[in-house]
Image (cartoon, rainbow, N blue to C red):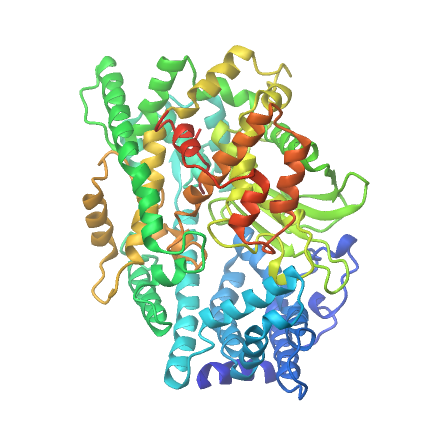
Amino acid sequence: MAQAADAALQVAQAETKVTSDNPFFHPWNTRFGVPPYDAIKPEHFKPAYEKAMADHLAEIKAITDNKDAPTFANTIDALEKSGNMLGTVARVFGSLTASNTNDQLQKIQREMAPVMAAHGNAINLNAALFARIDTLYAKRDSLKLSKEQARVLERYYIDFVRAGAKLEGKDRDRMAAILQRLAVLSTQFSQNVLADEKEYKLVLTSEEELVGLPEFVRAAAAQAAKERGDEGKYVITLSRSSIEPFLTFSANRALREKAWKAWTARGDNGDAQDNNAAIKEIVQLRIERANLLGYKTFAEYKLADTMAKNPQAVSDLLLQVWEPAKVRAAEEKDDLAKMAASEGQNIQIEPWDWYYYAEKVRKAKYDLNEEEIKPYFQLDKMMEAVFFTANQLFGVTFHELKDVPRYHPDVKVYEVKDKKGQHVAVFYSDNFARPSKRSGAWMSSLREQEKLSGKVTPIVMNNNNFAKGAEGQPTLLSFDDATTLFHEFGHGLHGMLSDVTYPQLSGTSVLRDFVEFPSQILEHWIEQPEILQRFAVHYKTGEPIPKALLDKILAAQTFNQGFATVSYTSSALVDLAYHSLTDAKDLDPDKFERDELAKLGMPKEIVMRHRSPHFTHVFSGDGYSAGYYSYMWAEVLDADGFDAFKEAGNIFDPKLAQKLYQEVYSAGGSKDPMEAYVAFRGRAPKVDALLRNRGLLGTGSRVN
């Protein structure tokens, strides 16, 4: 601990270059106080971090030096008001390193990871600060706190204890060292994955290489080629929105295999960007961290502060779905083999064949194919659809802002207003894949809502990785892409509609296995005819999607769910297995992954949705470690919760929408998640809806 504190103090005492051109040292005169991205340069961040950390430590010292007895106001309120500049710097920096990074930013990211960890340790392991929190927590029942204040105090106490605040001496020092090293390894892991994704491109030039690819795939590949300096050619990248269409339509089996192997080998190529050594060290350090806090495994530690509570509850849920999913996947594989044989292909179905023949089987079973669907799913119209859905449910409207700075020309920014026309939030929408952007889809905040320091409205960001349409042409989405758009927008609404007093409870600051509920329940609206008939219009003719095609899309929603469920659930089970280890000193991640999948009876034709060496959810930070199951846990809630709207006979039922807003979207972390769900639904959730929607009794959840 002494070393961590010394490191933090050295940073705090460093001379900061408060130069006139550093935007972080001056008020932002932008509309709604959005970041002045046009003025922020990489060299501004380190001085800003140094000053912000120094200010934060001074604020903490003022709390601990206070000779008055601890009160909620002089301890918890003061804590909540501290570190504002640091939060701003970190959120802006994070938005750039995730969405538009470069070598200079990545170097700063590597340098700052251990420094920020040391700073966090200097606060979370501060004995004097914890003593004040502990005193308040011990007499919390006599403090006459509001429900929200009681929740804030409880969360501070739990978070500090789980960070190691009760540790002493060598144990405290070791915890600090572990957290610093984990910060370094997590940064290294994510940068390695991004490097593999950025470096790879499958360049196609001949018709033999393009065979089978429909026009929308070729157009996106041509645009990707242009962006990467290969104009006149076609490029397939490792972005999911590029690789999956290629695997779906390419009739060139050898190229499908080549692309699939590159996609699944990210972070696993035995080179400088290989992540296996990092995984081994991360898992071992997490075990040691859990042991220091009195837990046998990291999974036990992590799940103690979730709705699930323990690994057994997670395992029970996943295995309840796993076995029927394998049965369904086996049936699906047989259908694919029959399709290949009918075309004269005497082959064993391999993982790189699945998407290709599944599309053919879907066409045969439902008279449906992606090439027929995509023209009706324009990105711009789907954005209108999410805005319409939010308006119908919660009364909010979105108004594009043309005069605010942004970090990339592709980003669109909107002001959000309530039904009275009052300002609610600012929303950044960044939808396109590019080499400087990490893969996947996510929501983040540039400013969190709170009322403790006056009325502070949120600034929320959604990122997707859609393949951009050719110049002058609309970007066309798959139905899965459109569902992802709704999913991330659900997270966005959770941040934008937050209405709490304390920053600690703002927006998505909820238990990990509840955070996916607001996002996943919103997915259900993209499946509704009321939405599709209005916004799914052909990009050339403007005609709404024909009812016959719409019916086929909806009928096909349980198609291939054995594959999707096996792919996702295997990832969640392997995540749980890693973090149920009691010793990882001899861990070989590749072998461990193979062995765990063999124990589960993983079909050889299906790969994990996220293989270990690029499983950023789990190894690029702590967010979903031992927690990838959260998507399925939340799916129990979202499937059952949307049933309430169906039972009401109105997908925009105003009474239900108001309950959903009041108990979930606006409540942040101010309520116990199960209490919030029951207050919305009127009862506890049932798992039946999940199994039915995945077609395992008889449309699956979007996981990212």
Residue 688: image quadrant is top left
Q: Position of residue 331 (x, y in %)?
A: 26, 24
Question: Can residue 499 be seen here?
Answer: yes
**In the rendered image, the vertical position of residue 295 relative to residue 415, given as above or below:** below
Left or right, residue 372 beside residue 656:
left
Left or right, residue 292 beside residue 447:
left
Residue 360: image quadrant is top left
Q: Residue furthest front?
A: 142
Residue 636: image quadrant is top left
Q: Quarter of the image containing the C terminus?
A: top left
Left or right, residue 604 beside residue 617:
left
Of residues 252 and 433, which is closer to you in this image?
A: 433
Q: Quarter of the image containing the N terminus?
A: bottom left
Q: Where is residue 15 in the image (x, y as percent from the top left)?
A: 63, 83
Q: Position of residue 606 (x, y in %)?
A: 28, 36
Of residues 97 and 232, which is closer to you in this image?
A: 97
Question: Can residue 232 be seen here?
Answer: no
Q: Give the residue at x 46% y 37%.
A: 702
Of residues 388 and 151, which is closer to you in this image?
A: 151
Q: Give the residue at x 56% y 38%.
A: 681
**In the rendered image, the vertical position of residue 475 relative to residue 549, given as above or below:** below
